[in-house]
Amino acid sequence: MNKKDKYIYSAIFEPAEEGGYCITFPDLPGCITEGDTLAESLSMAKEALELHLYSFEEDNEEIPEPTAPEKIKAQNGSFIVPIEAFMPLIREEMANKSVKTTVTMPQWLKKLGEEKKVNFSLILQTALKQHLGIKDNK
């Protein structure tokens, strides 16, 4: 799979009956979002595209080539908007996203740590970095 740093896909903005827009990407089935205003819809479309492409990358799936906007037909009232995804920022954000993990320890130790108001996450992160010889997140 060939990762690129920047992708531009066409989104179809379809006005919703109750207001706002439903946004789909013809080249990316399942990549669907919505927004109440045009500004919110643009933001939601960008986020949906970025996460969809990131998911392809993480699953080592082939990312389809985008269709040229002039080749996409929009239904009456709908319109085409090119949406850009700059992947280095998304990859960095996702790599540094906090995730929850389960840790097993003796009950007495957990209780004592809670009484002393210990930040278990911070201590575990610090200890793991030290154990792995990591000085920063890179």
Image (cartoon, rainbow, N blue to C red):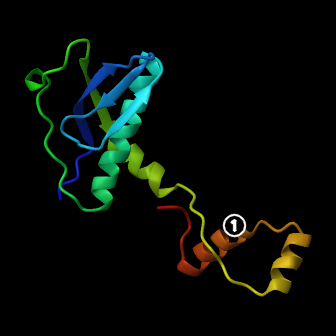
* Residue, disc 1: 121
- Disc 1 packing (10 Å; few <14; some 14–19; many ≥20): few
Residue, far left:
71
Please provide percent x and percent y for residue 113: 84, 75
Out of 21 and 92, give the one closest to the viewer: 21
Q: Quadrant of residue 18?
A: top left
Q: Is residue 7 above or below residue 122?
A: above
What's the residue at 78%, 87% (across, down)? 106
Q: Amino acid at mark 1?
A: Ser
Give the side of residue 91 with respect to residue 78, left or right.
right
Furthest-right residue in this view: 115
The answer to which image quadrant residue 110 occupies is bottom right
Find residue 120 and report its horizontal and vertical position in percent.
Answer: 74, 70
Residue 29 image position (x, y, % from top left):
23, 43
User: 41 above or below 128?
Assistant: above
Can you give x and y, in whole percent of width and height, for residue 112 in the image?
A: 88, 78
Q: Is residue 134 left or right of residue 103?
A: left
Classify 15 as above or below 27. Answer: above
Q: Residue at x 67, y 73 (%)?
A: 124
* Depth order, front residue of 26/98: 26
- Quarter of the image with the N terminus is bottom left
Q: Is residue 95 left or right of residue 131?
A: left
Report the label total: 1
